[in-house]
C-alpha cells in the first residue's frame, strides 16, 4: 500500500513516516518546506535505512499535486500539510484560509480525478472552540475561536460533504490535542521557525539558552494555577494513531472522527515543573498577556479511539519531557545546525 504524506517533512509528518515504513507501507513525501527541513527527511531515512521519494511542491498548485499521482500509484493520503499557529492565524487569517482550505480543496480534486478516495486528515482539538466542560468527547458541539481552528473545522465539513456526495470516499478525521516529545534517537523533533508558538519547544529552547525567558501567556485563567491547561500527547503516540486509522479505513461506512489525546490536562506551570524535574534544568519564565484565540482548558476523552482504533497513548509526561530535551540538547539550533 502506497501512502502519500503531505507535509511529511514536518514535525508530526516525519515521525509518522517512520512508523509507516516500519509497518510495511510504501511512502511518498510531499512538502514545500515552509516550516520544515529536507534534513529531517535525511534523518528519517537514516533511522529506517531506506530511501524515501521526496517531492517539493505547493499543495495549492494543482500541477504539483497531479505530478505525484501521475508518477506514483497512491492508495491513500495522510494530509498534514497546513499552517498551524493559533496566534499567527489571528494576525493573518487570509493566509490560513488560502493555505489550509484551498490547499485541501486542490488535493481532494486531484485525488478524485485519479481515483484515490482514502484520506486521513490532520485535524485539531481547536474545532471544539471554548468547550463548556472537559474532558471533551467527539460528540461535543464544534465552533472555533481563531482562524486556524476555523480552517480545520471547515475542512472537516468539506470532507463530510465529499463523503455525502460519494460514499466511495473513506475518510478519517483525527482531532489532535497537543503533540510534544521527539523520536527516542534524538535526531528528529520539533524545529519551529522563530520564537515557538507551541509550549514545549519554547521550554526546551529556553532551557538550552537559545531564548532568555519562557513567555507564559496569561495567569488569570479559571484553572488551578491560572495558566492554560492542555492535553499533551507524545508525537510517537500520535503517529501511531495514523497507522491505526489506515488499518481500519477500508472498512469504514461513514466518516470516522476520533480524538487523539491522553485524557490528562496539564497547565503551563505544571509542564515547566515536569520538564525541570526530567531535565535537571531550570526554566526561567515571565508572565505575558493572554494571546488572542487561546482558551482556559482543553483535554480529551480518548475512550472512543480505544474502541474504534484499538489505540491509546502509552507514553507519560516524563517520557515526553525527556525525549523533548534529548532532541533539543542534541540539536540546539534545530536542523539548521547540521
Image (cartoon, rainbow, N blue to C red):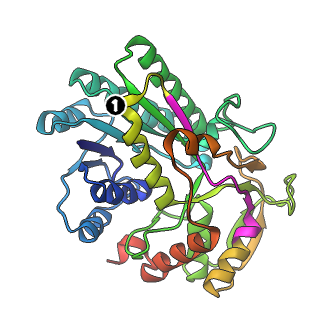
Q: Residue furthest bottom?
A: 280
Q: Residue at x 44, y 54 (%)?
A: 239
Q: Describe residue 197's horizontal placement relative to residue 277 as left or right.
A: left
Q: Is residue 263 magenta?
A: yes
Residue 247 image offset from top left, x and y in percent: 37, 41
262 is within the stretch colored magenta: yes
Residue 51, percent from left and from top: 17, 61
- Across and down, in percent, residue 306 comes to 57, 45
Q: Secondary structure at mark 1?
A: strand
The one of 235 and 89 positioned closer to us in this rendering: 235
Residue 331, percent across and down? 42, 78
- Left of 253 or right of it: where is 26? left
Q: Residue at x 64, y 38 (%)?
A: 146
User: Which sits in the foreground, 86 or 251?
Assistant: 251
- Residue 152 vs 311, above or below: the answer is above
Q: Where does label 1 land, which residue?
A: 118
Q: Which residue range is magenta in the image?
A: 256-271
The quarter holding residue 126 reads top right
Q: Residues within 10 Å of mark 1 (few under 14, many from 20)?
A: many
Amino acid at each position: 500500500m502506497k501512502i502519500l504524506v503531505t507535509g511529511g517533512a514536518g514535525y508530526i509528518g516525519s515521525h509518522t513516516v517512520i512508523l509507516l515504513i516500519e509497518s510495511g507501507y510504501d511512502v511518498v513525501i510531499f512538502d514545500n518546506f515552509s516550516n520544515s527541513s529536507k534534513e529531517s527527511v535525511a534523518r528519517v531515512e537514516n533511522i529506517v535505512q531506506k530511501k524515501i521519494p521526496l517531492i517539493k511542491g505547493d499543495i495549492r498548485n494543482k500541477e504539483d499535486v497531479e505530478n505525484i499521482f501521475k508518477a506514483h500509484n497512491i492508495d491513500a493520503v495522510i494530509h498534514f500539510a497546513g499552517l498551524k499557529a493559533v496566534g499567527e492565524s489571528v494576525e493573518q487569517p487570509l493566509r490560513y484560509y488560502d493555505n489550509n482550505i484551498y490547499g485541501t480543496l486542490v488535493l481532494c480534486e486531484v485525488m478524485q480525478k485519479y481515483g484515490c478516495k482514502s484520506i486521513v486528515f490532520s485535524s485539531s482539538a481547536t474545532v471544539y472552540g471554548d468547550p463548556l466542560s472537559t474532558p471533551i468527547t467527539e460528540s461535543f458541539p464544534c465552533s472555533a475561536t481563531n482562524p486556524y481552528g476555523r480552517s480545520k473545522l471547515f475542512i472537516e465539513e468539506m470532507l463530510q460533504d465529499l463523503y455525502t456526495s460519494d460514499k466511495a470516499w473513506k475518510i478519517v478525521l483525527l482531532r489532535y490535542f497537543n503533540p510534544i516529545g521527539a523520536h527516542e534517537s534524538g535526531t528528529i523533533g520539533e524545529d519551529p521557525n522563530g520564537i515557538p508558538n507551541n509550549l514545549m519547544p519554547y521550554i526546551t529552547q529556553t532551557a538550552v539558552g537559545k531564548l532568555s525567558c519562557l513567555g507564559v501567556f496569561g495567569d488569570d485563567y479559571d484553572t488551578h494555577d491560572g495558566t492554560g491547561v492542555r492535553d499533551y500527547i507524545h508525537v510517537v503516540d500520535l503517529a501511531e494513531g495514523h497507522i491505526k486509522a489506515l488499518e481500519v479505513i477500508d472498512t469504514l461506512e461513514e466518516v470516522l472522527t476520533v480524538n487523539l489525546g491522553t485524557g490528562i490536562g496539564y497547565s503551563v506551570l505544571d509542564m515547566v515543573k515536569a520538564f525541570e524535574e526530567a531535565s535537571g534544568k531550570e526554566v526561567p519564565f515571565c508572565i505575558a498577556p493572554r494571546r488572542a484565540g487561546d482558551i482556559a482548558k482543553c483535554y480529551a476523552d480518548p475512550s472512543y479511539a480505544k474502541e474504534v482504533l484499538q489505540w491509546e497513548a502509552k507514553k507519560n509526561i516524563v517520557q515526553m519531557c525527556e525525549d523533548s530535551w534529548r532532541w533539543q540538547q542534541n540539536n540546539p539550533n534545530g536542523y539548521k545546525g547540521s
